[in-house]
Amino acid sequence: MYSGEQAAGAVYENQPLVSAYGESVVEIKKADSEEWIPAAPKQPLMDGDSVKTEDASEAVIDFQNTKTIIQMASNTEIAVSGSSIKLINGEVWVNTSAALAEFNLETVSQKISAIDAIFDVFAQDKNAVVRNISGGIRIIGNKDLFVNAGNQVDFAPDASESKIDSDWMQSNWYSANISKDDQEKNLMAKDLRDEIQKSGTYYSSVDSTNFSIKKFLMNFKAAITFSDKKLRELYLSFISDLIDDGTYYFSVDDKQNGQNTFMFVLNYARDVDKENLNGLKDLFVDKFKKLKVFGRSHGNIYTAREKMRDLIFGSPVYGALTPEQKIYFIRTYLYDAVAEYDYIEANNLLASYFRNLLRAARTDKKNFAKYIAEDNGIASEIIINNPIFYKKENFAFKSDLEKLLEDQDKKSFIADKIIFLKYLKEYALNEEISVSDSLAISDFLNSKIKDCIAAVNDADKKSFESDLERLSDFFAFLADKSYANSTAYGVTVSDRFLAYLNYKRQEYQIEELKKSLAEKEQTVGPENKLDIEDIKKAISAKFEENGIKIEEFGEPQDDNATYISINKAVKDDVVFSATYNREAEVVSDIKTEDGYEFSLGVKLPKVSAALSTILSGEEHAAAPFALEEEQIAEESPAEISAKNLVIEKLDKFDVKVFPAQVFIVNLMTKEFKIQGAEIENKKEKILINFDFKDPFTEVANVELKTQNGITAYGADKTISLQDLNPKMIEFAEKIYYEQLDKEIESSKFKAQSSKP
């Protein structure tokens, strides 16, 4: 490994080499010189050396020791600092996908750390743009920022993360480096695979149930005298050969023998002697790093890398690792999870990362305190930007991680969870997360917020509650299975959510409508018991004053005896029945014994004229229009509820309306138009049109519907609900008598004209 603390100009084994592409002009400046000189092919670089490219020139720097490759764009300058570089200006493409350790790159004001990743950095003056192509990279500062694959961070002027600019991804620089990386990785993998397959196996298949390495080596020692040191070397050599055999089996797709061989090694490792432990640890670490170049695309040989990691975590070797080594191997699960984003195993890898991190932190809290704080932020960034990781189990792991933090900042905990919930909504509506997972996650995160929110100050609490209120419709939607899970309200989740919002909006409007329509109940005290016989006598007297004799009464039609049925009355030898409204002194439902009807109500003095109209065969005046049957469009439940509420309100004021007669102008502003409402009046049917809106204490633009058309009550006139019934009765009678007088005059004229 290189060290940034080495003296300038120091020479290392496996030094980084710089090479120019084609005719590119590439220059270097030695650490102890100010002169730029042309770089030789595969020019070794020492600590403090600088490299720059000219116009239309590119270069590659190969850090052989750590297997990190850097592509330099034209007009770029870098300085070597141990196993890292400093980007002075220009653009570099860094590939650490096969790196054996984290690689650091510095600009004037930023530090980027990466392993198992490919990223690009453009720097000019103090500004920089960091683009993550694959894997995971960290930008180290006051608060670490983990940049996910496919995202970029622009530091001009602030560190804002967004998707990588599509135009940049269409550039020749991007496509050329993707191609170079693929070629390099495949070449490395091929060379290693060829080497593995060429070597074959050291042993035929090993039967781990009967074979004892200790017995084998002790028998070997009995025949030949070895020192303990030599014997340990023999132990490790034998295990190394077995690992190579297992890797070989996987490389030729012999999975069964591969599994058996690695299982044998694991069984030995679990029983390793203390004297051999450190040697075994170094062996396992080196083998893992050697196999690190393999990815899932390389087939079953990738499994050998996974088996090596299992050996490290599943044996006493884990306990021999330093804290730095532990966090390195723990994070390989995290980086692999990001790299395997399109595979089902991604969540299993993330779970392994959390489990091993929690295991390490609980057993070594002192050394892992800094890693817990760091990884808590890293994990947040990874989960936030990758919907595949939105699983309740991952958030539960994250919550366990927070409990181990030395700084229990409840405010940041809540802020984190609210950000998760905001992204959850976006991912769920885009159908990147299932509804069931979304519901489980939202319930879990809300419960954790509830646990913490009492610990924050009032201002923060109010702000958080406001954020949650804005998300409350989404939470309620997830919990409402009739909407969230039913395609009846839309094919997509987004469509169903919009349908739910519309339903809730209408439901809210209905509640507001109820409030507006509500009125205090009028309490009516008990009245004295009515004397029906006295009432009938009084009515008989009034009728006799107008030349009408009542021979038989019917029963009262209401509790207050306002309407009295008259079964038989006689006027000028004409026998008829009727209904009398004793409060309004109006006679209605007039019907002669011959079956002729006069459907409108008339004042008592006008009964004679009404009978004359019937007997003359003329059509009676002020006959109401029959309601035309209207086509009713399909209505929402909210619209139906709104109409019913309006109908109930008007009914309290003796105005009868059916749903088809109520038209919603605007449910939000609570405006309605009523067509053909019937004023409750026993003597006649009075039909009116009017406008009805909040605060629902009066009506406007009232029109009376008659046989002869529409008669407006008066332009811009309003009538209170309490006065609507009596005023319309009065207005209808006025219009009726005006028309009736005309009919009577017309009847007299015809009668006189017909005399000889």
Image (cartoon, helix red, strand yellow):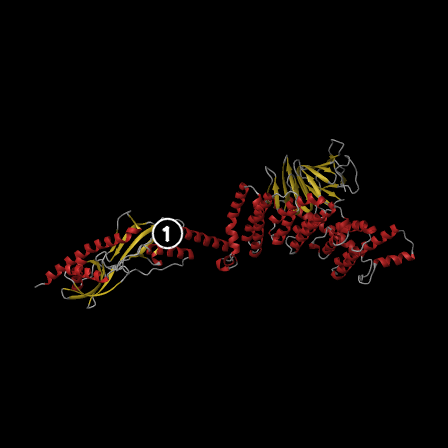
Q: How many marks?
A: 1
Foreground pick, 303 / 69? 303
- For residue 272, side relative to residue 694 (left or right): right
- Expressed as whole percent of the image width and height from the top left, the position of residue 707 reads 24, 58
- Which residue appears farthest toward the top when viewing the image? 34
- Which residue appears farthest toward the front when viewing the image? 528
State which quarter of the image contains the N terminus: top right
Q: Quadrant of residue 17?
A: top right
Q: Quadrant of residue 560?
A: bottom left
* Secondary structure found at label 1: helix
Residue appearing at x 65%, y 45% in the figure = 405
- For residue 281, side relative to residue 398 (left or right): right
Foreground pick, 537 / 737? 537
- Expressed as whole percent of the image width and height from the top left, the position of residue 35 reads 74, 31
Q: Residues within 10 Å of mark 1 (few under 14, many from 20)?
A: some
Foreground pick, 529 / 490? 529
- For residue 71, side relative to residue 641 (left or right): right
Residue appearing at x 92%, y 55% in the figure = 224
Camera sees residue 489: yes
State which quarter of the image contains the C terminus: bottom left
- Expressed as whole percent of the image width and height from the top left, the position of residue 211 reads 82, 61
Q: Report the residue marked by disc 1.
A: 517
Foreground pick, 432 / 165? 432
- Which residue appears farthest toward the bottom when viewing the image? 594
- Expressed as whole percent of the image width and height from the top left, the position of residue 500 reads 48, 54
- For residue 385, side relative to residue 616 (left or right): right
Camera sees residue 149: no
Vertical side of 504 occupied by 455: above or below: above
Vertical side of 382 occupied by 588: above or below: below
Tell me which amino acid carries mark 1: Leu
